[in-house]
Image: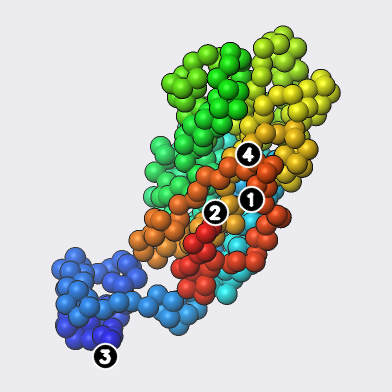
Amino acid sequence: MRPTVNDIAREAGVSLATVDRVLNARPGVRDKTIRAVNDAISKLGYVRDLTAANLARSRNYRMAVVLPDTESQFVQTLASALTDAGSIAATARIELSLHRFPAEDPHALAALLTGLPGRGYAGVALMAPETPVLRDAIRGLRAKGMPVVALVSDLPNTGRDHFIGIDNRAAGRTAGVLMGRFLGGTPAEVLVLGHSLLARDMIERRRGFDEVMLRDFPGIEVLPSLETHGSSQTLRQVVAERLANAPNIKGIYAMGDGHRALSQVIGDMGLSGKLLVICHELTPHVRQALEAGEITAVITQNLGHLARSTLRVLRAKADNLPLDVGQEQIRIEIVLRENLPGTPDLAADSGLDPAGTTDNAAA
């Protein structure tokens, strides 16, 4: 017969109310009493059924996800995946709320985050560049006991609890291998685009890309990164100027978004299908460009898996439970026109049972 909280109370010589306070990490219990309760738990082999406990006290997990307010198809697709995962996770008493912030306004983001603890949230996940203002805001949330998870682009210097996304340095190395092998190692120049070199994912992708190009393809010159700051107009202008003045450019590595503007300027210059283009994330436009031969290869990640992982990790952090690291690892995927998958149904496999513990192994 499985031990109960009554057994723990008898073994530790304390009341049921004290056991409840210890199990739920509530204040007001002496260290000596906490040790006695934990010793009783270990001796009896008690395993807590959190799902039953949360249902009994009607606990809801209110989670905030904060994304930049941009026209990026990747961000819009990520938002849809999170909304779908949140709808399915409602049966597990998880309520997901999406918040947007002006992409170029770190102070507005900090103000948004600062206001979350008083609104009943159990955790927050966000996609944002790391700035001093953001670091202070996240540290403030952590000081108030709110778990913070970084999405897509890591925030390693903020004290965040976990990062959910691909290994961006490995993704950059993957792009380097593809670029060098597709170009055949012949002398050429490669143009690199990124929306901001303040973003950790851009920094890590460029670093990984350079590592491979310098080591394995020294005959290919990788040009300095061009920043677009999320502006389609800026992207078209800088790419047109660089292509017009550097006729030896044979490849383009687009580390961030702006794929529609990139395809447009390449097409306007009569270069569609004549340049090797490698980018990230299988958005609707990238899919079309891949089918048309305008983009050569895409390095992507399963956003359904990322969304489900976000909810699982936030819930585990809220309950002070360990993570299944293998289950939460987001894998790098390479997509070519020849292996282009069908349109994914993000809601087809919820990957989240009422206990919020499972995912499709293939995700």
Q: Are marks 2 and 1 in contact (CB under 8 Å)?
A: yes
Whole-angstrom CA distance, mark 2 to mark 1, is: 9 Å
Q: Residue drawn at (47%, 80%), measured in percent from left and top?
A: 55
Q: Regarding mark 1 in the picture, which secondary structure is present there?
A: helix
| Residue 1, numbered circle | 3
In the displayed structure, would residue 13 be above or below residue 83? below
In the displayed structure, would residue 178 be above or below residue 351? above
Residue type, numbered disc 4: Val
Q: For mark 1, does the 10 Å Cα neighbourhood hold few (<14), some (14 to 19), or many (20 or more) residues?
A: many
Classify residue 127 by image quadrant. top right
Q: Are marks 3 and 4 in contact (CB under 8 Å)?
A: no
Q: Position of residue 275 (x, y in %)?
A: 71, 24
- For marks 2 and 4, the one nearer the N-term is 4
| Residue 306, numbered circle | 2
Whole-angstrom CA distance, mark 3 to mark 1, is: 46 Å
Classify residue 345 by image quadrant. bottom right
